[in-house]
Image (cartoon, helix red, strand yellow):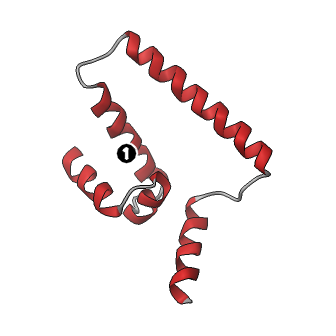
Amino acid sequence: MRDARFDETRVRSVRPAAPTASVTSRSHSQVMERIGEALRESFRMPGNNLFRDVERMLIADAFKYCGSNQVRTAELLGISRNVVRTLLNVMG
């Protein structure tokens, strides 16, 4: 019982309170569209390492958003803490 409650508490601390489903899906789709637009713009003027640059920004921003907590960052991104730790070490 304690582990389930602890996990639920951690997840709530990463994510803000959930609005209604219709607002969430609309907001999510708007955010994804803005991300898509930014990516398409990047494709028109790519650097040598676009994937690495996007990955680095995603990990760094998520880590900062989660208060430099690897577990919360992993939960937010849907990856394991080991992957977060490895990416942070590789990025320096």
23 left or right of 66?
right
Tag 1, which secondary structure? helix
Q: Residue furthest top?
A: 44
| Front position in the image: 66 or 11 | 11
In the image, is residue 53 above or below residue 82? above
Where residue 49 sits, quadrant-wise, is: top left
17 left or right of 92?
right
Where residue 83 sits, quadrant-wise, is: bottom left
Q: Residue furthest bottom?
A: 1
Q: Residue at x 65, y 39 (%)?
A: 28
In what quadrant of the picture does the N terminus appear?
bottom right
Is residue 79 at least partly visible in the picture? yes
Q: Tell me where residue 27 appears, x and y as whole percent.
A: 70, 38
Q: Tell me where residue 54 appears, x and y as whole percent.
A: 36, 33
In the image, is residue 87 above or below residue 58? below
| Front position in the image: 56 or 68 | 56
How many discs appear?
Answer: 1
Q: Tell me where residue 72 appears, x and y as whole percent.
A: 46, 62
- Residue under label 1: 60
31 left or right of 44?
right
Classify 10 Å Cα crowding around label 1: few (below 14), some (14-19), many (20 and above).
some
In the image, is residue 61 above or below residue 31? below
72 left or right of 53?
right
Q: Tell me where residue 43 appears, x and y as whole percent.
A: 39, 15
Q: Residue at x 66, y 31 (%)?
A: 30
In the image, is residue 44 above or below residue 55? above
Is residue 92 at least partly visible in the picture? no
Task: Give the amino acid type for the residue marked by disc 1 in the picture.
Answer: Ala
